[in-house]
Amino acid sequence: MEIKKQLGKRIKELREQRKISQEEIAEHLNIHPANYWRIENGISYPKPENLEKICEVLDVKAKDLFSFEHIQNITDIKNELQKIINENEDLTRLIYKFVKTLND
């Protein structure tokens, strides 16, 4: 499963645990609920500034969003990241920024 879908699944999981609606988060992000739906369904990545706001609303750190408990195989994770790095330069930069943020 690709990272975008895993991230969306994780955000949805955390949102539902906190009993927050998609509309509430979309309002906090100042985006249309349909655009937020695209994030949770793994169609779109959140912008870095929206990722930060999602963390605020869910009261989690960025690294918690990327804690994919439902991914067990590290080889699959590495393969998926390598595929992204090879295919999408912009996304590679974004991943790099996220990783740097997690390590700071």
Image (spheres, rainbow, N blue to C red):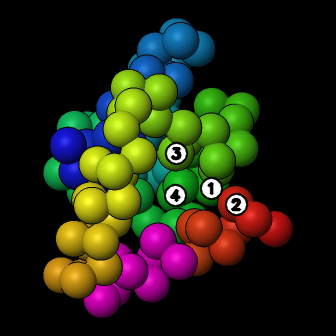
Kindly indicate the quadrant of the structure image that contains residue 57: top right
| Magenta region | 89-96
Residue that appears at 53% across and 55% down:
51
Question: Alpha-carbon neighbours of circle 2 within 10 Å: few (<14), some, or many (≥20)?
Answer: few
- Residue 35 in percent (x, y) is at 26, 49
Q: Contact (CB < 8 A) between labels 1 and 4?
A: yes
Q: Distance from label 4 to label 3 (Cα)?
A: 15 Å
Q: Earlier in the sequence, mark 4 or mark 3?
A: 4
Of the two numbered discs 1 and 2 in the rendering, the one whose residue sits closer to the viewer: 2
Judging by the rendered image, the residue that carries numbered circle 3 is: 66
Quick check: 92 above or below 16? below
Judging by the rendered image, the residue that carries numbered circle 2 is: 102
Kindly indicate the quadrant of the structure image that contains residue 13: top left
Kindly indicate the quadrant of the structure image that contains residue 37: top left
Q: Is residue 75 magenta?
A: no
Q: Earlier in the sequence, mark 1 or mark 3?
A: 1
- Residue 76 visible, this orientation: yes
Residue farthest toward the right in the current orientation of the protein: 104
Judging by the rendered image, the residue that carries numbered circle 1 is: 52
Judging by the rendered image, the residue that carries numbered circle 4 is: 50
Secondary structure category for the residue under label 4: helix
- Residue 93 in percent (x, y) is at 45, 84
Q: Is residue 91 magenta?
A: yes
Kind of residue indicated by mark 3: Phe
